[in-house]
Image (cartoon, helix red, strand yellow):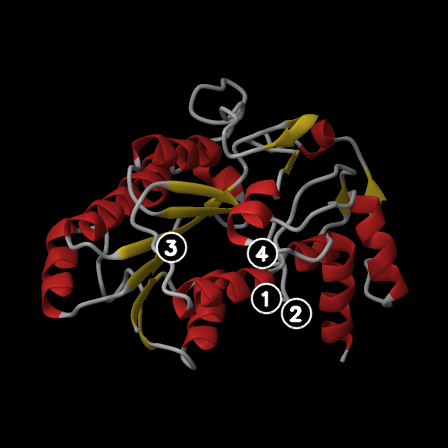
Amino acid sequence: MNVLILGKGYIGNYLNDRLQAIASVDFESRRWFDYTNARILDKRFKEKKYDYVINCSGYTGRPNVDQGEEEKELCYKLNTFAPLKVSSMCKLHNINYIHISSGCIYTGYGKQYTEEDEPNFGLFSEESSTYSKSKHAYELGCDYGLTLRVRMPFCDELHDRSILTKLLNYDKLVDYVNSKTYIPDLLDFIELLIKGSYSTKVKILLNFVNPKPLATNQITDIMKAHELYNTNWEWVHFEELRTKANRSNCILSTTKLEEAYGFKLIDEEVAIEKALANIST
């Protein structure tokens, strides 16, 4: 298997390490391989036959999505237009395409949101962030490839992009329930797709989060039990944070993942306990 991974960020680096054992992997950053340029993509795809292209790139903003409000054009370029070019070029060259995206296009607790639900915190919402709008815009424009919607990812180390690390570093916390993604589970699933030669040549939207999400206070309780906490933690209302952009707060359904792919994820509490145990060791 020949695999091209785009984006040397949080998930991209873990994915590159995982797939080395089962595939010949080309791992590219935008700095050295401008995958926002359709001509450059076309040239590469003519030179080398890839079985899968996995796009882990995108704009999240530093330190958070508030930056997207200051760099709206760049946010749309990297979250909407660039991945649409990659998808289109994969379609042209008949390559399986997997796009790592976001489930932060819904908000509210009226239901668990499925892949068939119209996003209520996306392009057509006056309350949503530029980040969420750009992610929804990609889904609307895309007609090819598997889009994996992840949320608030975490892993087995204190990576600066892990939600566990962010909670540890925040002094002020807001208590919401949100779906989250345990990265080792995501890697297992992508490895399963590639080893099983699953086709991702049609448009598929798939929520990829761990079931039974916890509230923030439940997570901090677990962190305290593992002696990993911030003594300055203070519970506040979201409005007190004075963010530039609103945030998505929701629970995503995993029914499609389980029924269509037979892939059962561990519950979020189990995943967090597992991650913290590995961090402690």
Give the mark nearer the N terminus: 1 vs 4: 1
Q: From the viewer's perspective, is 213 left or right of 197? A: right
Residue closest to the eye, 81 or 257? 257
Task: Tell me the tag on residue 114.
Answer: none
Contact? badges 4 and 2 (CB < 8 Å): no
The answer to whether mark 2 and mark 3 are in CB contact below 8 A is no
Sequence-wise, the earlier of marks 4 and 2 is 2
The percent position of residue 8, horizontal first and vertical second, equals: 39, 65
Q: Amino acid at mark 2?
A: Asp
**Residue flagged by tag 1: what amino acid is it?**
Pro
Image quarter of residue 250? top right
User: Badge 4 is on which residue?
Assistant: 263
Instruction: Determine the residue positioned at 56% across, 33% down.
Output: 114
Q: Identify residue type, mark 4.
A: Phe
Question: Alpha-carbon distance for marks 3 and 4?
Answer: 25 Å
Mark closest to the chain's N terminus, 3 or 4: 3
Drawn side of residue 184 relative to residue 196, left or right = right
Q: CA distance from mark 1 to mark 2?
A: 8 Å
Q: Secondary structure at mark 4?
A: loop
Residue 71 image offset from top left, x and y in percent: 38, 38
Residue occupied by mark 1:
184
